[in-house]
Image (spheres, rainbow, N blue to C red):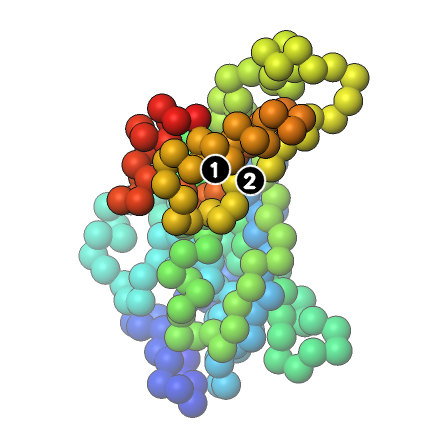
Amino acid sequence: TETKAGTGFKAGVKDYRLTYYTPDYETKDTDILAAFRMTPQPGVPAEEAGAAVAAESSTGTWTTVWTDGLTNLDRYKGRCYDIDPVPGEENQFIAYVAYPLDLFEEGSVTNMFTSIVGNVFGFKALRALRLEDLRIPPAYTKTFQGPPHGIQVERDKLNKYGRPLLGCTIKPKLGLSAKNYGRAVYECLRGGLDFTKDDENVNSQPFMRWRDRFLFV
């Protein structure tokens, strides 16, 4: 069967909801749970749209492929297990999706978000999609090593105690030479700041290579 929409969306060989909409599913403590606010395309049922989100962000694709039989689909697939209409909003729903932990690389925020909030946002079954909430279980957070040391070590290195640490980001964030960047850092620290930081746009551009910046600072 096909799910027809005014924009020509088709679910492939069979509807996503036949595989990925599982309202009887009981979530596990190890599942990563996501809540998506979605607006389906005209003619696309909410259950089909929610199932499409679960499918496209886990094991599904636009059609059935023979290699589906080479894996344990029931173990690895995402599941849309509940859908609620958004009060006061027309054709908006909250779709709740559960992902098994084995879908994600341990200790990788990048891998997790690439899967959950990746290409699914351009999916044709949806007019709009937004991730509203995410529950990350302790079983996954424990796979992250965390920082190499904590605030006490930072205070010991700076010999600063009993007050907040004060820092700033060097501006302008782009365009300073390494020498002028080092001068700005010096003036900030001489004026009483505890630390400075690079803006996230600063890497190793032609106007200020990383090594030159390091040497002047």
Who is closer to the viewer here, 49 or 14?
A: 49
Instruction: Name the residue that disc number 2 marks.
Output: 169
Who is closer to the viewer here, 114 or 98?
A: 114
Can residue 101 be seen from the camera position used here?
Answer: no
Q: Residue at x 77, y 22 (%)?
A: 163
Q: Position of residue 203 (x, y in %)?
A: 36, 40
Who is closer to the viewer here, 12 or 182?
A: 182
Q: Report, in whole angstroms, how far the alpha carbon at label 2 lies from the one at label 1.
A: 6 Å
Is 200 left or right of 177, judged from the image as shown? right
Near mark 2 (Cα within 10 A), the count class, few <14, some 14-19 or many ≥20, is some
Q: Residue at x 62, y 58 (%)?
A: 132
* Residue furthest bottom in the image: 6
* Residue furthest left in the image: 66
* Residue furthest right in the image: 162
Quadrant of the image for the N terminus?
bottom left
Q: Residue at x 56, y 16 (%)?
A: 149
Q: Position of residue 143 (x, y in %)?
A: 49, 26
Q: Quadrant of residue 62?
A: bottom left
Q: Residue at x 44, y 36 (%)?
A: 181
Q: Secondary structure at mark 2?
A: strand
Residue type pointed to by label 1: Asp
Query: Residue 149 got which mark?
Result: none
Residue type pointed to by label 2: Thr
Query: Residue 198 got which mark?
Result: 1
Q: Secondary structure at mark 1?
A: loop
Can residue 72 be seen from the camera position used here?
Answer: yes
Quadrant of the image for the C terminus?
top left
